[in-house]
């Protein structure tokens, strides 16, 4: 693993919701520029409140957000499909799909993407729920991001294993402290 050092921060337009992703919004353009990522099609597994989805919408022609949209947070925020669609209605380049990542993969098995972001686990981020979607991702994209590499060590393990198995470089961005006082980590797998 290589520590990712931010060279130039950016301030994309985002929605006003609480998210552990808030400190990461400033690094995405830097990652895209540094690794020469095309800006046509991004895929996100795990939309939650759509904060990160809107970050990606600043940089890509189209962003597909895949999530089962079946959670209610302890702060009372409902993450149902209609609520999240309303949050992102100002972003015409976002398409939300109401399903699990495994279902999406079965429908789009051979499609290629310019960037894939994985932030799934449905209850907790764990190896068993993340690895299958992540392995598919590195076979269909040359730049794959993983949220919570520090908060959940099993996500870090997924990144390490996939980097070795598929010949990717593994960077980890240790962002500033987030809104809940934590540093979650952003794993970056880039094809060598």
Image: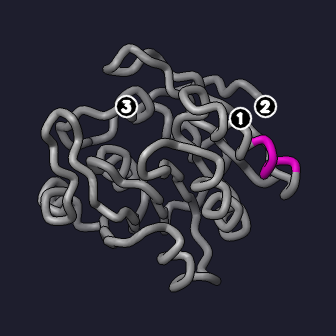
How far is the residue under mark 3 from the one under mark 1? 19 Å
Q: CB atoms at circles 3 and 1 under 8 Å apart? A: no
In this view, 103 is above or below 183: below
Q: At 38% from the left edge and 14% from the top edge, which residue is drawn? A: 181
Tell me the residue that label 3 is attached to: 20
Q: Overall secondary structure of the magenta stretch?
A: helix
In this view, 153 is above or below 141: above
How far is the residue under mark 2 from the one under mark 3? 22 Å
Q: For residue 82, which quarter of the picture?
A: bottom left
Q: Is residue 190 left or right of residue 5?
A: right
Q: CB atoms at circles 2 and 3 under 8 Å apart? A: no
Determine the secondary structure under disc 2: loop
> Measured from the top left, where is residue 189 in percent x and y?
70, 47
Residue 132 vs residue 2, the one in the foreground: 132
Q: Is residue 92 left or right of residue 95?
A: left
Q: CB atoms at circles 2 and 1 under 8 Å apart? A: yes
Q: Which mark is residue 1?
A: 2
> Measured from the top left, where is residue 93 in percent x and y?
30, 67
Determine the secondary structure under disc 3: loop
Q: Is residue 152 magenta?
A: no
Q: Which mark is residue 171?
A: 1
Q: Which residues are magenta?
A: 160-164
């Amino acid at each position: 693993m290589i520590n990712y050092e931010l060279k130039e921060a950016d301030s994309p337009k985002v929605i006003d919701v609480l998210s552990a992703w808030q400190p990461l919004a400033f690094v995405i353009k830097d990652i895209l520029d540094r690794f020469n990522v095309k800006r046509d099609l991004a895929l996100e597994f795990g939309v939650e409140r759509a904060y990160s989805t809107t970050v990606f919408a600043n940089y890509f022609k189209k962003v597909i957000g895949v999530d089962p949209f079946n959670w209610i947070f302890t702060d009372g925020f409902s993450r149902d499909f209609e609520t999240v669609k309303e949050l992102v209605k100002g972003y015409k380049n976002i398409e939300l799909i109401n399903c699990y990542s495994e279902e999406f993969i079965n429908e789009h098995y051979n499609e290629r993407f310019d960037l894939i972001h994985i932030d799934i686990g449905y209850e907790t981020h764990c190896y068993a729920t993340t690895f299958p979607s992540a392995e598919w991702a590195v076979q269909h994209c040359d730049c794959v991001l993983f949220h919570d590499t520090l908060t959940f060590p099993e996500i870090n393990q997924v990144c390490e294993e996939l980097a070795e198995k598929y010949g990717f470089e593994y960077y980890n961005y240790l962002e500033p402290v987030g809104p809940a006082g934590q540093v979650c980590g952003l794993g970056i797998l880039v094809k060598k």
